[in-house]
Image: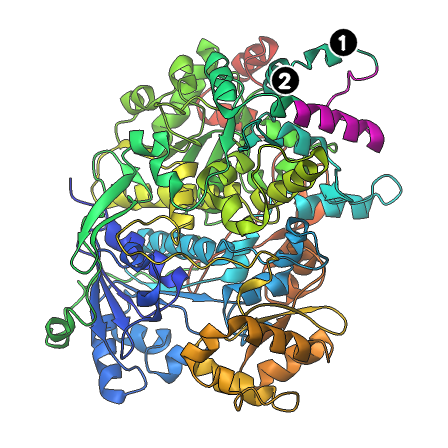
């Protein structure tokens, strides 16, 4: 029962959400984590979720601007396996804790850096606030349908920070795996920009195809002019029940949608010439009429009546839009024991999510509370350098860190399979077993393949009917040669097909079998269909974004229900969503499993779910204790969290201002002196005054920002060291892929697809100082079937017979 990261030591120099969540996972799975806090303690201590982020760690206060404290930090780092930092480029070096300096004394050190915009490129020196990255990349523009006013909308969920944390964790784990072979550590780099890049499922590829065939296609947003533009919005309907509860339905596939239409009493439409193409209508008026009929049908039943219908037909399902910490009481979270109570010396009983990944034989633990300020300072200052065990170094040529690792993928759509794609980008061989017709994500949009490109990149595709005895035997043979298995079916499917954990571990006892469903492998919701917006609603993510701006009243007029439904759809599924979060959790689960096995853990079933990942992504809400302050929430118009962290309209567009700390006030006030004497205004004299008069400060700043253009404000304030950027009026796929940011920062490369030709894709989302990533194209269905079967020992005659019988394609 030894946790997988036991006996590893890590130093966390960060005081950001991203860094805290990296070191939290390391601590949860057994590493000794030392959090180096500045004098007076980390700014994170003032946040309600601090007990969650800091659990299991040790605390020491050091002033990294002081030479003697730098010496202590260096001693700790040189005696550690991992270091985590989130400074802007150059800061760590200035404080004598940069990678090159530390690696010279500890060649085995894995040094993980998370920046806002990358270490190079045009925006490398911008402050790394979440809001600045979201604004600059067009993330807030992508959420603009959440508000009735014009302009971008602030999204509260930390899409960039949590995602970058998962990427950094994956880089650390991959580097640990590689270090066991080379004896050398290395630098691991990722950014908040790359974190957001993990979320976009297909927008950039849709745009690329539309640009390649301008006479045939034009790009359009999923929602426009108050109307759903795509049938997927209707399949994933948001609607209000008769008793005022918003519901998010989950009916993407044809089979599930037909079941939904039966539940709505609208299945007669499929045999009616006027309506038989439902939910796909080119005529806007027809589409609106169909949408309204669906909304009215849902509104005819109470939540209890719908829940009874869900019990009667397991193919019909909707999640209630949860709020706050309600996810901790989700029946599936309780069934899977994914909620823990930790006794904290300062706060008493603290209820919070358990570890992100559940390893059945070598689990992690979240039982240790957060440390008091400098609780371990004396112990750590007196600790002599603990030498990291010497390793035989083998520099060799630059190679991918996961070279030689084989992953067998059994899953469809995005949330789990993109997790395996992340490993393919690090050099793992991923063999994707698809049904003969291919993963349904390939055909989810009107142009073949484009919806599935990103989730299939770098993989080998073998098309097999696993419901046949011969197909199942092929899967078992691959499993015997694999290191990891990824499975994401609904509960009961893998068992019915004979490819569950018991069956594959019997074939290969050293296998790490990672279950990555939406809900669980059993329990009250394990067999329920779920997609990104389902979990976005059920976890509370959508309501976290939309805040208090959507009414939940039983007698809302149809026109208000339509507007609110589209706003909630945007809150749950826009430029970033639960699928992206879940995929990142899967990538972390796979790599944690690999490192655990490499460090002596036996083959075992492992679980990571969309729900459990969302609990960690929404960490600011997912914690309960007496006296807990509320998590920061956006204003009803979704400008931002407060006057110094919000969107402002300018003479020609929008900017996002990020100067939330007391230390940043003087610089902000001085920069705006030509327009107003904010420093001399008694309403804003102290930090308490500024908080008390926040609305008035926002009004004053709004008046100032309207006087100049957005680009001028960005230039003037950033030159003064104040966080302020022009908010892009395009979505991230355009900003990163087409407007230069991605190319200039090295985040975008070109690959060639077998049928679609050359197209851009994101480069691997983690980079290394010694190892290399792999940026490959996606395969077509069954592209590698014959090659894999030959490798397994099948003759040409037998392959031909399997193809003739429909077992393979």
In magenta stretch: residue 753: no
Query: For the residue carrying disc 1, how many other residues have a C-alpha within 10 Å: few (<14), some (14-19), or many (20+)?
Result: few
Residue 341 placement (x, y as % from top left): 22, 45
Q: Is residue 50 above or below residue 496?
A: below
Disc 1 and disc 2: Cα gap in Å? 15 Å
**Secondary structure beneath disc 1?**
helix
Depth check, front residue: 449 or 809:
449
- Circle number at residue 264: 2
What residue lies at 45% left-to-right and 43% top-to-bottom? 323
Tell me what residue is drawn at x 36 percent, y 42 percent. 589
Number of numbered markers: 2
Name the residue beneath numbered marker 1: 271
Residue extent of the magenta highlight: 274-296
Say which element carries label 2.
helix
Q: Is residue 337 left or right of residue 463?
A: left
Which residue occupies 26% across, 88% down? 67
Taking 341 as reference, is 542 left or right? right
Quadrant of the image occupied by residue 218:
top right
- Does residue 93 show up? yes
Q: Earlier in the sequence, mark 1 or mark 2?
A: 2
In this rendering, is residue 457 above or below 477?
A: below
| Residue 280 belongs to the span the image colors magenta | yes
* Residue 781 visible in the current orientation: no
């Amino acid at each position: 029962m030894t946790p997988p990261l036991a006996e590893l030591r890590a130093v966390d120099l960060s005081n950001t959400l991203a860094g805290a969540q990296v070191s939290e996972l390391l601590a949860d799975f057994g590493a000794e984590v030392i959090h180096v806090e500045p004098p007076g303690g980390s700014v994170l201590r003032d946040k309600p979720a601090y007990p969650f982020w800091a659990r299991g760690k040790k605390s020491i206060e050091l002033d990294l601007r002081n030479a003697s404290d730098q010496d202590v930090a260096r001693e700790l780092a040189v005696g550690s396996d991992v270091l985590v930092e989130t400074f802007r480029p150059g800061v760590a070096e200035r404080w004598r804790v940069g990678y090159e300096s530390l690696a010279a004394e500890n060649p085995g050190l894995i040094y993980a850096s998370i920046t806002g915009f990358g270490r190079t490129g045009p925006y490398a020196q911008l402050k790394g606030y979440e809001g600045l990255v979201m604004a600059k990349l067009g993330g807030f523009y992508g959420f603009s349908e959440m508000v009735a006013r014009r302009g971008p909308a602030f999204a509260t969920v930390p899409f960039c920070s949590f995602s970058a944390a998962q990427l950094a964790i994956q880089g650390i784990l991959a580097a640990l795996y590689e270090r066991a072979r080379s004896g050398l550590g290395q630098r691991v780099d990722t950014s908040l920009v790359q974190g957001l890049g993990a979320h976009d499922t297909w927008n950039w590829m849709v745009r690329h195809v539309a640009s390649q065939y301008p006479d045939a296609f034009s790009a359009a947003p999923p929602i426009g002019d108050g109307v759903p533009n795509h049938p997927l919005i209707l399949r994933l309907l948001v609607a209000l029940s008769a008793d005022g509860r918003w519901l998010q339905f989950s009916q993407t596939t044809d089979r599930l949608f037909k079941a939904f239409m039966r539940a709505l009493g609208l299945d007669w439409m499929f045999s009616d010439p006027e309506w038989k193409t439902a939910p796909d209508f080119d005529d806007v008026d027809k589409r609106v009429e169909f949408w309204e009929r669906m909304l009215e049908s849902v509104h005819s039943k109470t939540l209890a009546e719908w829940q009874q219908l869900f019990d009667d037909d397991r193919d019909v399902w909707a999640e209630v839009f949860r709020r706050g910490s309600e996810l901790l009481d989700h029946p599936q979270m309780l069934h899977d024991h994914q909620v823990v109570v930790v006794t904290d010396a300062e706060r008493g009983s603290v209820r919070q999510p358990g570890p992100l990944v559940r390893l059945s034989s070598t689990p992690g633990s979240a039982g240790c509370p957060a440390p008091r300020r400098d609780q371990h300072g004396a112990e750590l200052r007196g600790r002599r350098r603990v030498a990291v065990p010497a390793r035989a170094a083998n520099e060799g040529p630059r190679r991918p860190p996961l070279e030689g690792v084989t992953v067998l993928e059994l899953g469809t759509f995005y949330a789990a399979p993109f997790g395996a794609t992340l490993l393919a980008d690090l050099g793992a061989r991923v063999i994707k077993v698809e049904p003969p017709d291919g993963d349904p994500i390939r055909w989810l949009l009107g142009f073949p393949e484009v919806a599935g490109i990103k989730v299939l990149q770098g993989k080998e595709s073998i098309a097999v009917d696993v419901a046949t005895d011969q197909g199942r035997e092929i899967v078992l043979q691959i499993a015997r040669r694999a290191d990891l298995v990824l499975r994401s079916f609904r509960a009961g499917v893998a068992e019915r097909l004979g490819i569950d954990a018991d069956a594959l571990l019997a074939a290969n006892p050293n296998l790490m079998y990672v279950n990555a469903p939406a809900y669980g492998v059993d329990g009250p919701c394990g067999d329920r269909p779920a997609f990104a917006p389902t979990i976005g609603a059920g976890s509370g993510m959508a309501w976290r974004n939309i805040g208090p701006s959507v009414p939940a009243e039983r007698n809302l007029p149809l026109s208000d229900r339509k507007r609110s439904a589209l706003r909630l759809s945007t809150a749950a599924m826009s430029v970033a969503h639960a699928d992206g979060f879940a995929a990142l959790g899967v990538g972390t689960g796979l790599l944690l499993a690999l490192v655990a096995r490499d460090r002596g853990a036996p083959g075992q079933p492992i679980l990571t779910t969309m729900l459990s990942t969302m609990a960690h992504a929404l960490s600011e809400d997912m914690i309960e204790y007496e006296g807990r302050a509320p998590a920061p929430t956006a204003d009803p118009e979704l400008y931002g969290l407060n006057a110094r962290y919000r969107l402002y309209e300018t003479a020609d567009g929008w900017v996002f201002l990020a100067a939330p700390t007391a230390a940043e006030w003087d610089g902000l006030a001085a920069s705006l002196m030509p327009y107003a004497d904010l420093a001399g205004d008694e309403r804003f004299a102290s930090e308490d005054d500024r908080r008390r008069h926040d609305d008035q400060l926002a009004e004053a700043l709004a008046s100032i920002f309207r006087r100049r253009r957005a680009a001028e404000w960005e230039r003037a304030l950033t030159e003064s060291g104040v966080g302020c950027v022009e908010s892009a009026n395009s979505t991230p796929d355009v900003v990163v892929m087409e407007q230069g940011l991605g190319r200039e920062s090295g985040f975008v490369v070109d690959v060639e697809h077998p049928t679609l030709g050359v197209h851009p894709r994101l480069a691997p989302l983690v980079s290394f100082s010694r190892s290399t990533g792999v940026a490959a194209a996606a395969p077509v269905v069954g592209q590698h079937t014959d090659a894999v079967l030959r490798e397994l020992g099948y003759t040409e005659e037998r392959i031909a017979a399997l193809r003739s019988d429909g077992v393979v394609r």
